[in-house]
Image (cartoon, grey):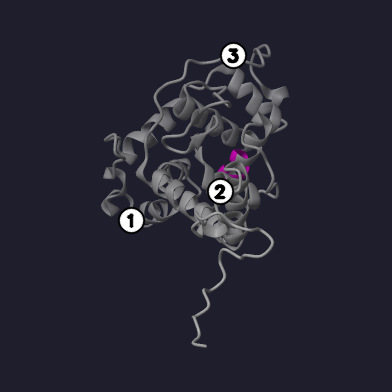
Amino acid sequence: MPLNELEIFLGALRKVESGGYTGTHAYSNPRTGQVGAYAVSIPNWQLWAWQAGVPNADWRDPAAQDFIARHKARELYERYGSWDAVAVAWFAGPEHADEYVRAGASSGVPFLTDINGKTVSEYMGDVRQAMDEAPQFVKYQAAKRAGLAHEFDGESPPEFEPPPERTAPVYRTTNIEAQLKAYIEATERAEDEVSPLRPKLTAMLNGLSNRVAGGTRSPLGRAAPTASLDPVTRDPYAEEEEPTDG
């Protein structure tokens, strides 16, 4: 694989997913769970970061985003040998990319749509077009990373372009399902951690409530006595003695 194609593909992903060839690394959409310039879902980010050897990477770090996206894109290209198939995997998941590689259009994969009605075929076309139309600065950066900058035709272009305007993100069902699953799992873990503490917390709250009420409330929900009491000689909660004959 020509290494400069990898960098041009990543630039095209940024263009398609976050509105410009430099991307919007600060992008976050809580509705879809997608974050960063490459619109990666949080569950995928955690998995891909671990696969890239940086499990604690923060998605808010632009360098981490580029590193992990580069690692994943290279892995997918080595698996499929086609940027179209990598685009399918990015948009619809590796299982559909596998089908596309095996059977092409007859697999039906190009006609799958997300809930916005965008097809896999349209997404592939967008990425391919963005690769073909990559500006000079992207091509130069790609050649530079590949060690081929000396072969670049013409003067070195600027290193960066102005930040792009954010375009509407693609709203994918698969990302929502993964995000909901991660949320449910996190909630269940939290419940498991809190459950053993619940009796102690209940007792503490009842004690505080009793003190705030000036001692008129009894601990743990027992009804407070209403009769006047001798605190030394009488226990309000003692069982009444049965009268005896004699």
Precedes in sequence: disc 3 or disc 1? 1
Q: Nearer the viewer, mark 3 or mark 2?
A: 2
Image coordinates of residue 231 in percent, x first then y, are: 66, 58
Residues at circles 2 and 1 in contact by the CB criterion of under 8 Å: no
Query: Is 26 located above or below residue 46 in the figure?
Result: above
The residue that mark 2 highlights is 216
The kind of residue tagged 2 is: Thr
Relative to the observer, which residue lies in front, 61 or 88?
61
- How many numbered circles does the render carry? 3
Residue ID at (40%, 44%) = 176
Magenta range is 69-73
The residue that mark 1 highlights is 103
Image coordinates of residue 199 in percent, x first then y, are: 58, 61
The kind of residue tagged 1 is: Ala
Q: Does 183 sit left or right of 54 as displayed?
A: left
**Crowd rating for badge 1 (residues with CA inside 10 Å; few <14, some 14–19, many 20+):** few
